[in-house]
Each structure stands twice: as C-alpha cells, then as structure tokens.
Amino acid sequence: WQRAWFWTVLAVFWAAGFQFAISHGNRDFHRTDGATEQMLLHAADTYARDGFLKNHLLPEYPAFGFDENGVSRDKPFVYTHYFPGPAWVLGFIVKYFGKDGIWTSRLIPLSLNVFGLGFLGLEFAALTGSSVLACLLMTLLTFARGLTIFSISFAGHGYVMGIFLVMF
C-alpha cells in the first residue's frame, strides 16, 4: 500500500499541474511570478521573430526597471544576469508550436518537480528506513505553497525548485 500511496501522490500532483497548464498555461499567471513570466513571453516572441542568435542567445526583455546609470528604461534591453534556459525553452516552443503551445512549457518544470519529489521520497525512505514516513513527507510537501506555485511556472523558479528537490 505504500507504493500505491507513493505513486498516487506523484500522479495527483502531476495531474493537478497538468490541469492548470491546460486551463491557464498560454498566458502569464500572477501567482507564479507574473512579472517574470511576462518578461519571458516577450523574450520568446523576440526569439521567434528575430531568431536566437540576434543577441548571442541572450533574451530581450521589455522595458522595466533602471539601467546601470540609474535611468528608467524606456525600451527593451538584453538581459545578462541569469542563465536564459527558461527563455530558450519558451522561445523554442513559441517559434515551433506558436503561442497556443505555451502551456506545454509548464509541463517541463512540473515533470522535473514530480521527479524531484519522488527522488526525495526515495532518499528519505532509505535514510529513515520507513516508507510510510517518506510518503507522509511527500504528501505534506505537495501542500507547500512554494512547491505548488513554482512547479507550474515556466520561469526559472520551477526548474530551480525541481533541481533543489533532487539535490536535497
């Protein structure tokens, strides 16, 4: 029965994320860091329109914030601060599947988080010798707001959360 519990937790968590991706996935969502998602959508549009090499693989974000001189930005700019992997994924999806396929980009971090949650459960079971405690831990983690919200974000948070679960 512990195996059934283990797989049920993972399946229900993935199914809930899949349902969200289908119902809300082609636009930014304010609860998953909507500002970052808006920037990534702009970057994806730029990649689809101008290609990935225009800015040497770096994403172009819409005007926001201030430049290095403290002046408010009034035009799009090339973003150089974080690894642009999520922007590449979203750009690839928009370029080859169109904007109606954006929801599929939410499935990548969701699947990574489900894998990470399962891996953490297996590690915890090996550490404690109790599969019941591991299943209980996994069940409780699925209620953690950070995991539920960011696992369906196509921004970097979703990818990072899944990687942290595996590294734990």
Image (spheres, helix red, strand yellow):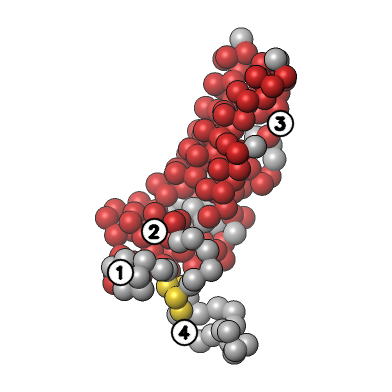
Task: Residue at 70% x, 27% y: name it.
Answer: 137
Give the alpha-carbon distance from disc 1 to disc 3, as whole Å.
Answer: 44 Å
**Relative horizontal placement of residue 27, taking residue 130 as reference (left or right):** left
Q: Label 3 near label 1: C-beta < 8 Å?
A: no
Residue 35 lies, with reference to residue 161, above or below; the image says below
Q: Earlier in the sequence, mark 2 or mark 4?
A: 4
Q: Earlier in the sequence, mark 4 or mark 3?
A: 4
- The quadrant where residue 44 appears: bottom left
Instruction: From the top left corner, tell me how far across and down residue 58 is, in percent.
Output: 41, 68
Give the alpha-carbon distance from disc 1 to disc 4, as whole Å.
Answer: 20 Å
Three-letter amino acid code of the residue under disc 4:
Lys
Q: Which residue in the protein does label 2 denote?
A: 88
- The quadrant where residue 142 appears: top right
Q: Is residue 20 visible?
A: no
Q: Label 4 near label 2: C-beta < 8 Å?
A: no
Which quadrant holds the N terminus? top right
Q: Which residue in the protein does label 1 denote?
A: 53
Question: In terms of secondary structure, where does tag 2 sit?
Answer: helix
Q: Which residue in the protein does label 4 denote?
A: 75
Q: Nearer the viewer, mark 1 or mark 3?
A: 1
Q: Nearer the viewer, mark 2 or mark 4?
A: 2
Instruction: From the top left corner, tell me how far across and down residue 3 is, in percent.
Output: 57, 14
Task: Residue at 44% x, 75% y: name it.
Answer: 78
Q: Which residue in the protein does label 3 denote?
A: 140
Three-letter amino acid code of the residue under disc 1:
Leu
Mark 4: few/some/many CA within 10 Å (<14, 14-19, 20+): few
